[in-house]
Amino acid sequence: MKHIGLLLILLVASTARADVVTVVFQPPALSGSPGDVLSFFGTLTNTTNAVVWLNGDIPNLPSQIPPAEFDDSPFWLNTPLYLAANGTTGYIGLFNITIPAGLPDGQYGGTFEILGGADGGSQDVLEDSPVSFTVGVGQETSSVPEPGTLSFLGFGAGALLVCGRVMRGIGRCGAR
């Protein structure tokens, strides 16, 4: 009886597995308008004590976004051939999606998986479950200026202040 219990524990333990590589999108949701190219960035981390080869990717796009609108060239350009034991890529570009013309406003979810394994020919899926991302389509309005706009506003206000002081100084010099 003890042997059957041990056998069951070993059987269950052998089917449970953790992610070999974790993928974290930063951010996992991007928005734009038709024609915009959305660039998804993130990190890949090897969670094992062995080298893991990164040999490909599998996108699962929403049915409304044709496969031709998916560009994984950032994955091939930025991802190393392999990750060392417990290694990470850091923050890299993974793929781009072009929002097709005529796509109605809304949120469109997809998934992304990494293929690889113990050698350069392995094609194992390296995550327990696909990593989700979201493509938002529509006009976003914001009452808060973007950070780039704020810096231009600050520069412009400072320039006006300096210009005003210089002009007042010139006026005084001319009055003498």
Image (spheres, rainbow, N blue to C red):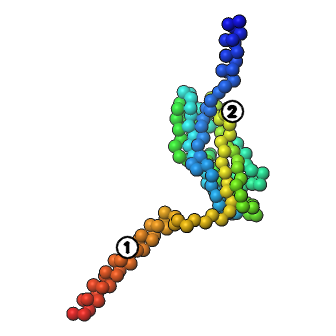
Secondary structure at badge 2 equals: strand
Q: Residue 33, percent across and down?
A: 67, 63
Instruction: Give the x, y percent position of residue 48.
Output: 56, 29
Residue type, label 2: Asp
Check disc 2 and report the residue beneath it.
124
Q: Secondary structure at mark 1?
A: helix
Q: Residue furthest bottom?
A: 175
* 12 to 32, vertically: above or below: above
Look at the picture and state if 124 lies above or below 58.
above
Type of amino acid under label 1: Gly
Q: Is residue 76 above or below residue 148?
A: above
- The x and y percentages for residue 163 are 35, 80
Q: Residues within 10 Å of mark 1 (few under 14, many from 20)?
A: few
**Rendering quarter of residue 3:** top right
Q: Residue at x 65, y 35 (%)?
A: 127
Q: Residue furthest top?
A: 1
Label 2 crowding class (10 Å Cα cut-off): few <14, some 14-19, many 20+? Answer: some
The label number, if any, that marks residue 158 in the structure image:
1
Q: Are marks 1 and 2 in contact (CB under 8 Å)?
A: no
| Quarter placement of the C terminus | bottom left
Comparing marks 1 and 2, which lies closer to the viewer? 1
Q: In this rendered view, identify the residue nearer to me: 87 or 7.
A: 7
Query: Is 14 situated left or right of 155 in this image?
Result: right
Give me the C-alpha separation between circle 1 and circle 2. Answer: 58 Å
Of label 1 and label 2, which has the lower sequence position? 2
